[in-house]
Image (tube, rainbow, N blue to C red):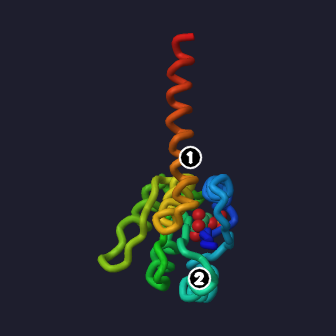
Amino acid sequence: MSKVGIIMGSKSDLPVMQDAIDILKELNINTEVDIVSAHRTPDKMFDYGKHAHERGISVIIAGAGGAAHLPGMVASLSPLPVIGVPVKSSNSIDGWDSVLSILQMPGGVPVATVALNGAKNAGILAAQIIGSADKTVLDRVIQYKEGLKTKVIESSKDLNN
Ligand code: RP5
């Protein structure tokens, strides 16, 4: 079964990245979570980027903050789709540094960048990528979206009660 690899530059990113772990658990998709720092463990990052696809990982979610080089560097090393999560970390000035470090990739090396701290959407996007080739996962995504619709309809009913 497909797995999503979730990596982050530091354990301090975990409170944000937990949203990706949680939504993928809810969608019943296996994850492999690790800390991989582009700057502090560059050899581990190279190894991860080169070999993740060989052990059943089909999408990578990479979160980092500040000078956030992890998603882009992993995208340069891996044939897998990489979803980048900009984190508003302690070394981030205002979040824009994290966003732009991940977003502005050169042609040929895409990183699908979600919103600042948008790890939940990264998880959903990873599920949708897997779901495009796996009917069981696609059905779970459809159900999840139905749930979103129901919640909005229910909350608007509450307004007039
Ligand atoms: C980045 O630096 C990490 O992804 C994290 O967002 C930020 C701060 O890391 P720590 O100093 O908290 O370990 O590389």
Q: Nearer the viewer, residue 116 or 127?
A: 127
Q: Nearer the viewer, residue 115 or 61?
A: 61
Query: Where does ligand 1 appear, by image quarter?
Result: bottom right
Q: Secondary structure at mark 1?
A: helix
The crowding category of the residue bearing disc 1, from other C-alpha atoms within 10 Å (few below 14, some 14 to 19, many at least 20), is some
Q: Which mark is residue 94?
A: none
The quadrant in which residue 11 appears is bottom right
The x, y position of residue 12, in whole percent, is 67, 61
The x, y position of residue 101, in whole percent, is 43, 67
Q: Quadrant of the C terminus?
A: top right
Residue 43 visible in the shown view: yes
Q: Which residue is mark 1?
A: 144
Q: Quadrant of the N terminus?
A: bottom right
Q: Nearer the viewer, residue 74 or 161?
A: 161
Tell me if 34 is positioned left or right of 152 in this view.
right
Q: CA distance from mark 2 to mark 1?
A: 28 Å
Q: Residue at x 32, y 80 (%)?
A: 108
- Vertical placement of 148 versus 7: above or below? above
The crowding category of the residue bearing disc 2, from other C-alpha atoms within 10 Å (few below 14, some 14 to 19, many at least 20), is many
Tell me if 107 is positioned left or right of 1 in this view.
left
Q: Which residue is mark 2?
A: 52
The x, y position of residue 123, in whole percent, is 56, 58
- Vertical placement of 85 versus 152: above or below? below
